């Protein structure tokens, strides 16, 4: 188990913000309980850990969704799911062949788990 907490601060696009907000809404409806961004991303990470992720999935997402923007988002990744988040982040970096930023990883993970109704 990882120790500590990781605080992620990022500036994202309106497009990515809408994707994350829609995912929180969908997850809240599915669970019949209001869900936070943290709970939504944590759930998406646990689901994405067993998914096959292709380079085409990442490239297609990045082509359709501008990442950089002016909307401030803060996410606390706690010790109980830091290992899951870091594992998914490493897989995405390996698939892309270059380092990836949290502001791309987080919306991409949520995007991956939405179509299959895994979130």
Image (cartoon, grey):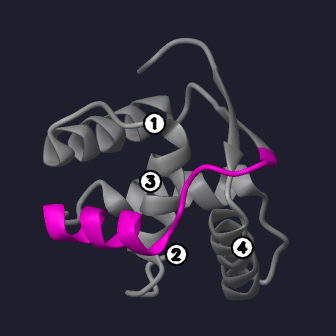
- Of the two numbered discs 3 and 4 on the same chain, state the one appearing first in sequence: 4
Asked where in the image residue 80 lies, by quadrant, the reply is: top right
Residue under label 2: 119
Q: Which structural element holds mark 3?
A: helix
State which region is magenta: 54-72
- Of the two numbered discs 2 and 3 on the same chain, state the one appearing first in sequence: 3
| Number of the front mark, 2 or 4 | 4
Which mark is drawn over residue 101? 1
The crowding category of the residue bearing disc 2, from other C-alpha atoms within 10 Å (few below 14, some 14 to 19, many at least 20), is many
Query: Quick check: marks 3 and 4 in contact, CB under 8 Å?
Result: no
Q: Position of residue 74 (x, y in %)?
A: 76, 38
Q: Give above or below for 14 relative to 32.
A: above
Q: Position of residue 3 (x, y in %)?
A: 52, 12
Residue under label 4: 18
Q: Position of residue 111 (x, y in %)?
A: 46, 71
**CA separation in Å, label 2 and label 1:** 22 Å
| 87 on left or right of 12 | left
**CA separation in Å, label 3 and label 1:** 15 Å
**CA separation in Å, label 3 and label 4:** 19 Å
- Residue sitting at x 41%, y 21%: 1
Residue 27 lies in magenta, yes or no?
no
- Of the two numbered discs 3 and 1 on the same chain, state the one appearing first in sequence: 3
Q: Which structural element holds mark 4?
A: helix
Residue under label 3: 45
- Of the two numbered discs 2 and 4 on the same chain, state the one appearing first in sequence: 4
């Amino acid at each position: 188990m990882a120790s500590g907490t990781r605080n992620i601060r990022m500036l994202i696009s309106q497009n990515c913000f809408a994707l994350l907000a829609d995912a929180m809404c969908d997850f809240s409806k599915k669970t019949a309980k209001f869900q936070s961004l943290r709970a939504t991303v944590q759930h998406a990470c646990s689901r994405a850990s067993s998914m096959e992720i292709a380079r085409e999935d990442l490239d297609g997402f990045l082509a359709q969704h501008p990442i950089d923007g002016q909307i401030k988002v803060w996410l606390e990744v706690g010790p109980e799911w830091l290992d899951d988040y870091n594992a998914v982040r490493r897989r995405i970096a390996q698939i892309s062949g270059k380092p990836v930023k949290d502001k791309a990883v987080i919306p991409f993970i949520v995007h991956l788990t939405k179509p299959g109704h895994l979130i």
